[in-house]
Image (cartoon, rainbow, N blue to C red):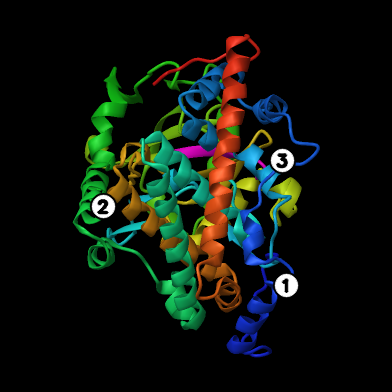
Amino acid sequence: MALSIRPPSGRSETRRRRTVAGKEARQQAPRSSHAAWAPAADHRDVLEILNESAKGRVPALVPIWFGRMSLSPFAFYRGSADLMAHDLSGTPTTGARVQLCGDAHMNNFGVFATPERDRVFDVNDFDETLPGPWEWDVKRLATSLVLAARHNGVSPENARWVTRTALRVYRGAMRAFGRARYLDTWYAHIDRRIVAAHAGRAETAVIEQAVRRARRRTVLHAFPKLVREVHGRYRIRDDPPLIVHYANPADERQSRTFYDRYLDSLPPERRVLLDRYHIADVAQKVVGVGSVGTVCAVLLLLGDRDVEDPVFLQLKEARASVLEPFAGPSAYENHAQRVVVGQHLIQESSDIFLGWSRLQSRDFYIRQLRDMKFSTDVTTLRPRTLLGWAELCGATLARAHARTGDPAFLAGYLGNRPVFDLAVTAFAEAYADQVEHDYAQFLRAIRRGQIRTHVDV
């Protein structure tokens, strides 16, 4: 199935010509125009959009979703990608498209293990992935940096510097990818050795801490916390309302069909590996902020050595991307397939068990749970370490966009001067103000009883 991303072929147009085309795109969308932010005349109703997003979620979990969003403007931002999707649709674009992360806030970057067990830094959330304007991801990331800095008590000057730095790194990395061979771009990765070579002592310490924590987040480490033995059988521990067994589980035939569809989405060698395991238990598990209320579950698989050879698979519902009304519909009928394909396109190396299926008209993607994955709480970082994290996010996002877009065109557009950096920083500050205004409206609705919340953290 063809994607709606078609970078110009190097055969028909030279790289130099595509760079020139990027410069010419400044006439359509001047780089300074990205600074502008003002709500449209028909500015969206915050509560209306949030209530629309609540449709189809598990009703009992919606108060938890709202409760987690109520903790801070940054948490509200994480859980309300719908709002920004609506707003970004009216901002300037060059017309160039990439495979978007779709929700590129800085908490959606982190450390995880490749199949070779090397630890790398990469994007780690793809629920909203879709082909679309590259500027949308960049502005989503930049605004998250401003909000995180404000949450941490960073001065406006330092917050501005953190955001500009991430954009400068994005621009510089795109310039390098614009000159690189296509294969070199595809193979490019950000591991702790690269971080150590380009970061200061404080930034390196943050990543090394993340790597150490990621190393501990393994299935064997999680097993005694998530599982208990009941009458000789291993069962996932209930922890209501965050982890519960289904009151009305799917029947055996539906479950078998679901699992077989999932296996069919995997390469043959991965199916051979999973055939060695048997399903021991399944339970619903609440995760994240924006995903709360969607159907998510944990599947416990055991090998012939039980506790010595477990596998946890996370089943996560995939709904239509919040970007679809503005960027166009997905090329895939199954939204979980959209997520999986997008992840493979963007990420350097994806989970070996990443696949998709469907159950009772709901789409699910499946991946391992706690396979050396870790993302630090960026709202606790000090200015210098926040700066290091921002640099990593900027470089990583540039590589993600270069893999599916035209880096020569984007490098030509961005140029050598910081015009774009300054403009998007100004946008991020103005849009962070908008988020705080929306958050205040959200809190007023809670106080008035228009929204019911349950804070579980």
- Above or below, comparing residue 330 to residue 455 in the picture: below
- Above or below, comparing residue 330 to residue 294 in the picture: below
Mark 1 neighbour density, 10 Å: few (under 14) some (14–19) many (20 or more): few
Q: Position of residue 270 (x, y in %)?
A: 42, 56
Between marks 3 and 2, how big is the CA–CA gap?
38 Å
Q: Nearer the viewer, mark 3 or mark 2?
A: 3
Residue 95 seen in the current view: yes
Comparing 2 with 325, the one in front is: 325
**Is residue 401 shown in magenta?**
no
Quadrant location of the C terminus in the rendered image: top left
The answer to which of marks 1 and 2 sits earlier in the sequence is 1
The residue at the point 60 percent across, 82 percent down is: 19
Query: What residue sits right under mark 1 in the picture?
Result: 27
- Above or below, comparing residue 190 to residue 307 in the picture: below
Q: As shown in the figure, which amino acid type bears the numbered disc 1?
A: Gln
Q: As shown in the figure, which amino acid type bears the numbered disc 2?
A: Ile
Quadrant in the picture for residue 331 = bottom right
Query: What residue sits right under mark 3 in the picture?
Result: 39
Query: What residue sits right under mark 2 in the picture?
Result: 207
